[in-house]
């Protein structure tokens, strides 16, 4: 199975990383100061705009290196034994620092995957890589992925509560993922057998 996985706020606690970066730089802020739109930062109240935040991804090794991972490493390692794992991120593809520090961060946290793609068009990459299931958090990306007709494992976040579709399965902890993937694999195998039976 080809499994697509988002990075920010899916395997890494990026919002926490943003707050900690500004605290390290002398600002008194917390997560309640993040103003979100479609699951992304529109503003850090009174301190930074969306543009400022996006520039961090292009220029700041300190910011990218210090994003704390969710406890996903064990689950990803388990999945990698039986599946092909592809990270698909909206981090800027044109910034050398973003690509390099993303690679270094994955290596630092022993997150082993088959490929990493930086893109502003996730559906195109999902189709190109023939992804069978996507692990995601974003209320902006999920409706676009739903239209492709593949299952989505959605990391439950406060900002994505309105997302609801038959192809979406919510999870709250990465330890749930291997079991959910196993169920999907079994379901797909059963459906394939049914198609073969009908075709006879």
Image (spheres, rainbow, N blue to C red):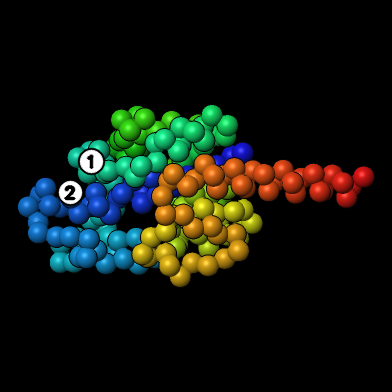
Which residue is label 2 attached to?
21
Task: Determine the CA span between mark 2 and mark 1.
Answer: 8 Å
Left or right, residue 28 beside residue 160:
left
**Whole-percent x, y for residue 197 in the image:** 87, 46
- The local secondary structure at tag 1 comes to loop
Q: Which residue is identified by label 1?
A: 66
Q: Earlier in the sequence, mark 2 or mark 1?
A: 2
Q: Which element is circle 2 on?
A: helix
At a point 30% along the width and 61% down the height, the residue shown is 41
Q: Position of residue 184 (x, y in %)?
A: 62, 47
Q: Are marks 2 and 1 in contact (CB under 8 Å)?
A: yes
**Residue 30, relative to residue 86: is it above or below?**
below
Q: Position of residue 1 (x, y in %)?
A: 61, 39
Residue lying at 24% horizontally and 63% vertically, measured from the top left? 34
Q: How many marks?
A: 2
Circle 2: is it few (<14), some (14-19), or many (20+) Cα within 10 Å? some
Q: Viewed as shown, does residue 179 lie left or right of 22?
A: right
Closer to the camera, 125 or 20? Answer: 20
């Amino acid at each position: 199975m080809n499994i697509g996985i988002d990075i920010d706020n899916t395997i890494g606690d990026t919002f926490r990383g943003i707050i900690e970066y500004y605290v390290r730089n002398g600002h008194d802020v917390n997560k309640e100061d993040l103003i979100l739109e479609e699951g992304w930062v529109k503003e850090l109240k009174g301190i930074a705009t969306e543009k400022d935040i996006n520039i961090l991804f292009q220029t700041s090794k300190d910011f990218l290196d210090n994003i704390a991972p969710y406890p996903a490493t064990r689950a990803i390692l388990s999945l990698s034994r039986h599946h092909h794992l592809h990270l698909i991120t909206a981090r800027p593809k044109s910034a050398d620092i973003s690509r390099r520090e993303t690679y270094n961060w994955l290596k630092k946290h022993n997150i082993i995957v088959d490929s990493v793609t930086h893109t502003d068009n996730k559906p195109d990459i999902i189709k190109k890589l023939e992804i069978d299931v996507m692990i995601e958090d974003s209320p902006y990306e999920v409706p676009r992925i739903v239209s492709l007709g593949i299952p989505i494992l959605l990391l439950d976040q406060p900002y994505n509560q309105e997302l609801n579709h038959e192809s979406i399965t919510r999870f709250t902890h990465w330890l749930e993922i291997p079991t959910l993937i196993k169920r999907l694999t079994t379901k797909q195998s059963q459906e394939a057998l049914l198609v073969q039976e009908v075709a006879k």
